[in-house]
Image (cartoon, coloured by chain):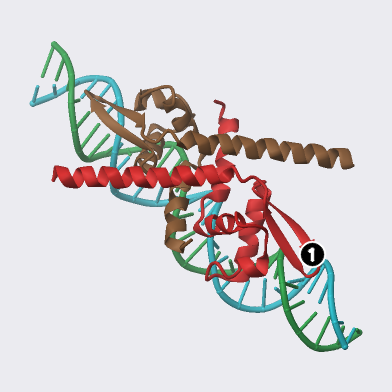
Chain colours: A brown, B red, C green, D cyan
Amino acid sequence: MKYEQAKVRADILKALAHPVRVLLVNALTDGDRCVCELNELADIDQSNISRHLAMLKKAGIVSDRRNGMKVFYHLQTPCILKAFECAVEVVRAEAKIRDTNLKAV
Amino acid sequence: MKYEQAKVRADILKALAHPVRVLLVNALTDGDRCVCELNELADIDQSNISRHLAMLKKAGIVSDRRNGMKVFYHLQTPCILKAFECAVEVVRAEAKIRDTNLKAV
DNA sequence: GTACTATATGCGCATAAGCGCATAAGGTCA
DNA sequence: TGACCTTATGCGCTTATGCGCATATAGTAC
């Protein structure tokens, strides 16, 4: 694999690699949400939610659509959920290793 | 989803979200490799390869095993490849959107 | 022991990411 | 028009990442 190709992939993963953005994407799996709704998910300033959404949009993970005063965000590439599933698998594997180590002690 | 749970997932994604680490994981899909081999993949200092591998190991994505002077790294959770596949899908979707926009112009 | 190879770590520095605050931009409604 | 609501952006600040260099650690071979 070429470095440039790896960088393209890394940039998409980077767009997901933040707790707030994980929460946002997770919330959007249930359907489209406006910023005001997404704003409730985390205890941070609204301006940051907006910025995180902009990053997800730039990465091609979500899209937005204005409806009156509100802007609704939509999960454009739901396959991203597979990445989450994998993250969960990694966590489980870690837990297993921890258990084994504990038994070894 | 709770913030803490999102953070755990984000941390694993973060471990993958770097071009060099993408290259490393990709190389390990073909089988275990020692650091000296992995070192060839990118044009950066050996100390950094070592650090990137340490990050992957800490995230539970790879494991290591010493054999004489060499340390071999092993892809512990191959499901991580699904995350890559998804990244590729996102890239393809972006390309499609670009095409559509171009046609619209 | 010394000399050598392979890998990891400490350090300082440059850059990027994330944050809150203030405010701009876009839209509604009277 | 002005008052109001929702979302995005500019700014400065703090912290996190990534890097190379030098060096430490671990193992081999003599």
User: Residue A91 location in percent, x, y?
Assistant: 66, 37
Chain of the residue under label 1 = B
Q: Secondary structure at mark 1?
A: strand
Whether residue A92 is visible here, answered yes or no, is: yes
User: Residue D22 location in percent, x, y?
Assistant: 67, 78
Q: Against A44, is B59 above or below?
A: below
Q: What amino acid does circle 1 point to?
A: Asn
Please identify the quarter of the rendering in which residue A31 is found.
Answer: top left
> Which of the two residues, B2 or B57, is positioned nearer the viewer here?
B57
Residue appearing at x 44%, y 26% in the figure: A29
> Which of the two residues, A83 or C23, is positioned nearer the viewer here?
A83
Q: Against C12, is B59 above or below?
A: above
> Which of the two residues, A84 or D24, is positioned nearer the viewer here?
A84
User: Residue B103 location in percent, x, y?
Assistant: 16, 45
Residue appearing at x 30%, y 32% in the figure: A64
User: Residue C12 location in percent, x, y?
Assistant: 59, 69
Residue, disc 1: B67
Q: Against A86, is B1 above or below?
A: above
Residue appearing at x 35%, y 46% in the figure: B92
